[in-house]
Image (cartoon, grey):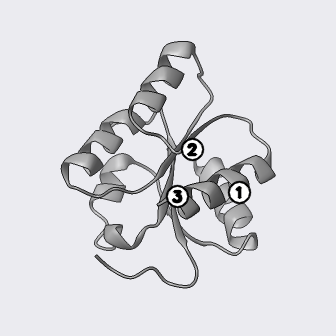
Amino acid sequence: MESRSATPLIGVVDDDASILRALRRLLGSAGFGVRTFASGEELLACEHLTTIDCLVLDVQLGGLSGFELQERLGEALLPIPIIFITAHDDPPMRERARRAGAADYLRKPFDDQLLIDAIERALNVS
């Protein structure tokens, strides 16, 4: 297992470029390192995947869904805490995220501080 750096690295996966830009700025200003990915496939191809301390993951992506990506990470034995984000919320989706062990589940649009707090909680648990 790689040692965690003093600055936690947060991976953000969303197929909306404006969300990626906004979250990169927000999380960077909160003191986190940030890597953004436009798809689950792009994240899985990242050679530094094991250095990511927490994922902010959109549920609905082109290609692999957020849930499918989480399953692939689990199969690869990469226990990265995941905070799911979605604009298309419904009770079955919330339940699926809960059963899958999500660190948190936030509906877009969400308050900036709510996301930062969720990441800090996820990092403290992992």
Residue 117 placement (x, y as % from top left)? 71, 54
**Amino acid type for the residue under numbered disc 3:** Val
Q: Residue at x 33, y 43 (%)?
A: 69
| Foreground of the two, 13 or 105 | 105
Extreme residue toward the top, this view? 91
Q: How many marks?
A: 3
Residue 89 placement (x, y as % from top left)? 60, 21
**Amino acid type for the residue under numbered disc 1:** Ile
Give the labeled residue for mark 3: 125
| Foreground of the two, 109 or 30 | 30
* Distance CA(mark 1)–CA(mark 3): 14 Å
The answer to whether residue 62 is seen in the rendering is no
Extreme residue toward the front, this view? 125
Q: Pointers 1 and 3 in contact (CB under 8 A)?
A: no
Give the labeled residue for mark 1: 116
Mark 2 crowdedness (10 Å alpha carbons): few <14, some 14-19, many ≥20: few
- Quadrant of the rendered structure where residue 8 is? bottom right
Taking the image as shown, residue 51 lies to the left or right of residue 55, namely left
Taking the image as shown, residue 32 lies to the left or right of residue 112, namely left
Q: Which quadrant holds the N terminus?
A: bottom left
Helix, strand or loop status at disc 3: helix
**Amino acid type for the residue under numbered disc 2:** Asp
Mark 1 crowdedness (10 Å alpha carbons): few <14, some 14-19, many ≥20: some
